[in-house]
Structure formats: C-alpha cells, structure tokens
Image: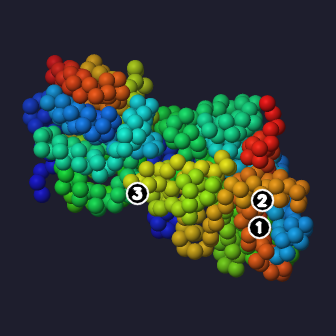
Amino acid sequence: MGKVGRFGIFGGQYVPETVMNAVHELEEAYAKYGNDPEFLEEYRTLLRDYAGRPSMLYYADRMTRDLGGCKIYLKREDLNHTGAHKINNVLGQILLAKKMGKKRIIAETGAGQHGVATATACAMFDMECEIYMGKEDVRRQRLNVYRMELLGAKVNSVDNGTATLKDAINEAMRDWATNIDTTFYLIGSVMGPHPYPTMVRDFQKVIGEEAKKQLMEKEGRLPDCVVACVGGGSNAMGMFYDFIPDESVRLVGAEAAGKGIDTKLHAATVAKGSLGIFHGMKSYFLQNEEGQIAPVYSISAGLDYPGIGPEHANLYKTGRAEYVPITDEEAVQALEYLSRTEGIIPAIESAHAVAAALKIAPEMKPDQIMIINISGRGDKDMQQIAEYRGVKIDD
Amino acid sequence: MTKNKIDARLEQCKAEGRKALITFITAGDGGYDCTEKAVLEMAKNGADLIELGVPFSDPIAEGPVIQCASERSLRNGTTLVGIFDLVRRLRKETDVPLLLMMYLNTIFCFGTDRFFALCEECGIDGVIVPDIPFEEKDEIQGSADAHNVHNISLVTPASEDRIQMIASEATGFLYCVSSNGVTGVRSQFQTDFAPFFEKIHKYAKVPCAVGFGISGPEAAREMSQYCDGVIVGSAVVRLVEQYGSDAPKEIGAFTKSLRDALDA
C-alpha cells in the first residue's frame, strides 16, 4: 500500500485545504467505527431489515443453456430496496454521519440511483438532503428526480460544463467547502479523496462476500469469472474485493464505450484514459494532453464518468482485473436479452456487464462458473430504451 | 539562486509601509492580447503581484464568475503553452511578480519538472494550486524549489489547528482565504476574522494576504487591516466579462481605485 490511502501509485487526498479537516475527521470516524462491532451490527441489521439482504444468487438456467458455455449465476443487487447496490454504501455512510453528529447530507448522482438511495436513507434517518445532478441526467432520469423529491430531498440541477455526473460532483464539492461545518458529503462511488475509495468499497464488499458464500453452498467451489460494470466502480469493487486473493478467479469490469471507443462519444476510461489527478485522487481519466477533462458520453447516466476509482486503476495496472469496453448498442441488446431469456430487466448500467458476459461465457467450458453482478434494475431506463429503439411510450 | 521577485516586492512593500495589492485575471479570457494589456494596466496602476488563472475544465474551487471566465477562455482555445508565450511577451515589458493559479492536473499532465523549468525560463515566480493540500505538496514542491518558484500555501477558516503546520512552512506569502467555500464576491463575511488572523500571525514567517470575496476598494481597505496584502480576483474578472476588449482600461482604473484605498 505505501502511503495512507494509496493503492499502488493511485489514490491520495488531492482536495482544497477547506475540506482537509473534514476529510481527516471522516478518516478518524471511519477508523473508529469501521471495525467497531456495535457499529457493524447496526449496519448489518439495516442491510438485512431495510435493504433486504442478502440479495439472491440466481442460477440463470436458460441463459446458460442458450450460450452453451459456462454456468452463469446472477447476483441480484437489483432486488435491494431502492433497486440497486447503492443502498449498501448509503446505509453505511449515513450511519457514520449520524455518529459524527452531522445533520445535512449532500450527494451527487448520475443515473439517480445513488441520489434515490441517499434520499431514502435521509428520510429514514430524518436528515436534510440535497442532491446534485447534471441537467442532462435530470432530463434522462426524470422518474428518479421525482422519486428523490417525493422522498423529501432537494434536487439541484447542475448546468455547468457537460451537465453530467462529473459536473454534479464539482458542484457537490463546492457545496461541501462552503458548508463544511454542518455537511456530510455522501460520495456514491469508490472515488474521491481517501478515505472514500476504501470506505465505499468496504460498504460494498458485502456483494462479493455473499456471492462467494452462496456459490460455495450451491456448487461447493469458487467461480472462474466474475463480471461487473464500471463507472466510478463501486458495484464492481464490491463484487471483486473478496475474490482478489483468489487468483483463479478472473475479474472483468465492463466500461461504457458509448458509440465506440474510436469515436469521441464514450466513457471508456481504462481503454482510452491516461494518468491524472482529479476529484481528489490520482487515477486514470479521459482527458486531453493538457489535462482538461474530456466530455464523456454513454447511454447510461450511471457510467457516464471520465474517471475510475483508484483501486480499480491499480487492479488494472497490476493485471489482476481486466476491463472491456461495451457499446450502447451491445448494452441495449444485452438488456433485451436478459429480459427475454430470464425475465429480469437489468439497469442499463448492469446491462454492460451482461453484454461483456455474453462475449466471454460462450468461450468458457461447461464445468466453469461465472457470476454477473446485476447491480440495479431497469425500470428507470424504460423511457430511454424505448427512445433508443424508436418506440414512443408517452406524449 | 537569484532572489524570487515575490519576496523582493513584498519586502519593498513592508519597507515602504504599505499594503500589497494582488490582482487576478483568467488568462486568455477575451484573448491573450486582452490579458496582456490588462496585466500591464494592473502593474502600472499599483498591483504588486499579479495572478494569471490557467483555465481548467473543472475548477472546483471557483465560484460562478471565474468558472465562466475559465469556460470562455477554453472556448477561445487557450492552452498552457499559449500562456507561457504570453508570459514571455509580458516579461519584455514588466518586472511585476507573476503567479499562475491553476489546478494540479494541468501541471501533472504537462510534466511537473518540465512545467517548473518553463516557469523559471519564462519568468513565473509562483504557483497557487488550490487542490494540493499540505499533505500532498511533495507532488510539486521539490520541482518548484529547484526552479525558484514559490508554491503558495493556503489557509482557510476551516483550517483551524492546521494553521500552524501550514503557516510555518509557507514561502512567498501565505494566502488566507477569507471564508469557507469558493471564489467570488461576497456582500458580507461570516468569518470571525480576529481569532483567525491572530492564529495566522502567530505562526506565519512570510507576509499574509487575504483573498476570496473582496469586491472593491472599500472591502479591500477593510480587510487590509488584518494582514499585509489583499487579493482581488472575481471583481477584476467581472470587468472582462462586462467590457470585453475594452476591459484593460477599466481594469486599470479599478486597480488604481484599489491602490488608492489601500494607501489612503
């Protein structure tokens, strides 16, 4: 690890002085509570009784037979309360915020899933909640905006820059610096300054721990391959983490290739990015040679981010995990495929993982096993998928 | 190593018993020529140090005024290389100490050593990098030192017990942020200045300048009581936004009004 908060050369705490004390305060609180049995018991109780964990590990029989390769299991994070893996992290951080005596929560959101999960937890914990969301994402994910407002959150539409996730993060960071005394910034992915990448991964690692145990019960062995989609990378990090020491397990992240990685319209950070320092961390970013952060594109508002969490950057650099680009078209086809084959409509983000699996599984042997993380459900995406397919579903 | 121009000028201010005036302008906003003229006007009308803002796609420490200036400048095609060329031209006409205010990624992607070597070669005397806190300053400090460029440290009201650590290692001057949050003109400050500056003066070994939110002559004079200099940024940038290519003259007059207020 080397320096605190580093994954190899990646990570760090590159944030303005104004928030440094808050970052240290969070670091200390997390060090205190992160291994505290009472805190963890409270957290696990919330995961069980409120989020509905453990999520199922489902054997996708039709998909397995159809593809004719390895056995395929789906980790059903889409069945969590609020419809995605995001709630795991939110419940952990909000519990920490409460212990720290914070009353106001801010968060960024791309697709809106993290925003909805945060608004949900704030309602339950009786905390003030403000969400920053790019104007473009507000348009793409109107239903989630309404859900957040219904839950009592204030949603701020961000019209700066590219009006998507990175701009929402910029604005949340500005709010945090302004209201540093009262406000807890509840980051939704394994990104930002230390301790966020570690803390968010710890609150998401339940995904991989459960999946490993569940597969042991069903098959008595480890999987050969696990696949998850990667924007900032929280569901993938949660899924991968417990498998990192198991070197026989191939770890595959699916990143958003939009219209294709040879076009300008993509968000494929590993395929096309370079080393940089932004949003508090040293990692890979899509940027030009002068370090201006590039506008990114994906059909998926949740993967539409020009960077990747520092631990993923290190998994890539050390060769422990591989990252494959998936286009919009491949993701939409995968969403349709899983819907028709297994009766499960995945989020368009998760459909990127399914698409990667559709390429890899047929190459694997029948006695091998793959787990795909279905990080969220697709209800929020119906309007947009219909639009993509040229189907009109409202006026 | 020759004496850094920032140190020389601030010592001169002290010797003359006056407050230092530090102004900021986003480089390339309104075009390089506009920036060049504006810098010369500011120098002529009493600015002691001048900060050139290097536009960045995602300026997280800036309020709306400088964010917009940054966007306008990038749309004009401003680049770091272009800014160094501008500095070379300026150095033929003025000795005013110049600093670059910029984000770390710009330095890192350009190549840290290459960047500071060019700073020295072109005549940049200091950098202000708002997203590099004390704990991460090793990222650039060695290279900055090797090329006689000050890496200016910032303290804010939220720094509290960190002030001692930061102030005692500061070089050039200590940038005292008037209030938590982002850059931009404020109509009033929430900060309790007396204890904030008391702590700063206890530990600082270099001159202290206050910035963020200073709107004009009156605020500059008011704030100057707490330290050795004042920094005015967004109020200058707003003149570029308002007057376009006529801005340099207006900026000159505005600088003079700030100078007069500080000297009164």
- Classify mark 2: residues with Cα within 10 Å, few (<14), some (14-19) or many (20+): many
Q: Position of residue A112 (x, y in %)?
A: 69, 42
Query: What is the total number of numbered labels drawn onto the structure image?
Result: 3
SS category of the residue bearing label 2: helix
Would residue A125 be seen by someone viewing this image from the given angle? Answer: no
Identify the residue at image location x=23%, y=28%. B248
Provide the chain ID for the residue under circle 1. Answer: A
Residue under circle 1? A358
> Counting residues from the N terminus, which is met first, the one under dot 2 or under dot 3?
3
Q: Position of residue A370 (x, y in %)?
A: 78, 71
- Classify mark 1: residues with Cα within 10 Å, few (<14), some (14-19) or many (20+): some
Provide the chain ID for the residue under circle 3. Answer: A
Residue under circle 3? A289
SS category of the residue bearing label 3: loop
Residue A131 versus residue A82 in the image, above or below: above
B95 left or right of B231 in image: left
Identify which amino acid the numbered label 2 is placed on.
Answer: Ala
Identify which amino acid the numbered label 3 is placed on.
Answer: Glu
Q: Position of residue B212 (x, y in %)?
A: 36, 32
Residues marked 2 and 1 touching at CB (< 8 Å): yes
Residue under circle 2? A334
Q: Quadrant of residue A225?
A: bottom right
> Counting residues from the N terminus, which is met first, the one under dot 1 or under dot 3?
3
Q: Quadrant of the C terminus of chain A?
A: top right
Asked if badge 2 and badge 3 are on a common chain, one would say: yes
Asked if badge 2 and badge 1 are on a common chain, one would say: yes
B232 left or right of A371 in image: left
